[in-house]
Image: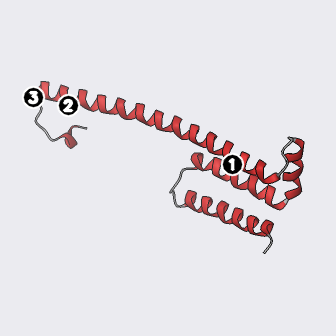
Amino acid sequence: MNIYVLSVVFCLLFIGSVVEMIRRRKISERYSLLWLILGFVMLIFSVFPKLLNGLASAMGIVYGTSLLFFIGFLFSLVFIIHLTTVITKLDRKMTRLTQEVALLKSQREEAGDDRPADRIL
């Protein structure tokens, strides 16, 4: 089997699996956007391998596959930075929520409220 046919099949399976994960709500749309972009870029380069080789030679890269690995490396860096910002935002929200819950418990204890916590809110 030709490597280009194999890569097209892999890219289509990859894109299909990402879409299926979105449909089943395993990943959200905004996080899957980078995966879909990667899948379509790889599909374009798989369908038009001369485009990859032409782009590589224009950039002074001898082998097209080296450019492909470089693109994958850059994608990984962008995705890691994106996930780091999401985790940081969630950590700040968690800290804020924990502080608010502690304040509510403190206020309830000061007021002498002995109702269960699920009935207060």
Please determine whether, in this image, residue 49 is positioned above or below residue 83: below
For the residue pair 13 and 68, the one nearer the viewer reads as 68
From the image, tell me which residue sits under label 2. 105
Residue 10, position in %: x, y? 69, 65
| The one of 80 and 67 positioned closer to us in this rendering | 67
Q: Which badge, 1 or 3, comes first in the chain's sequence?
A: 1
- Residue type, label 1: Gly
Instruction: Identify which residue, 29 or 14, lies in the foreground.
Output: 14
Helix, strand, or loop for circle 3? loop
Q: State the residue position of label 1.
A: 72
Give the structural element (helix, strand or loop) at label 1.
helix
Where is residue 33 drawn, in percent x and y? 64, 48
Residue depicted at 79% across the width and 60% down the height: 46
Mark 1 or 2: in front is: 1
Instruction: Of the two numbered discs 1 and 2 on the same chain, state the one appearing first in sequence.
Output: 1
Residue at the location (44% across, 36% down)?
90
| Quadrant of image for the C terminus | top left
Question: Tag on residue 112?
Answer: 3
- Categorize mark 1 by other alpha carbons within 10 Å: few (<14), some (14-19), many (20+): some
Q: Is residue 14 above or below residue 72?
A: below
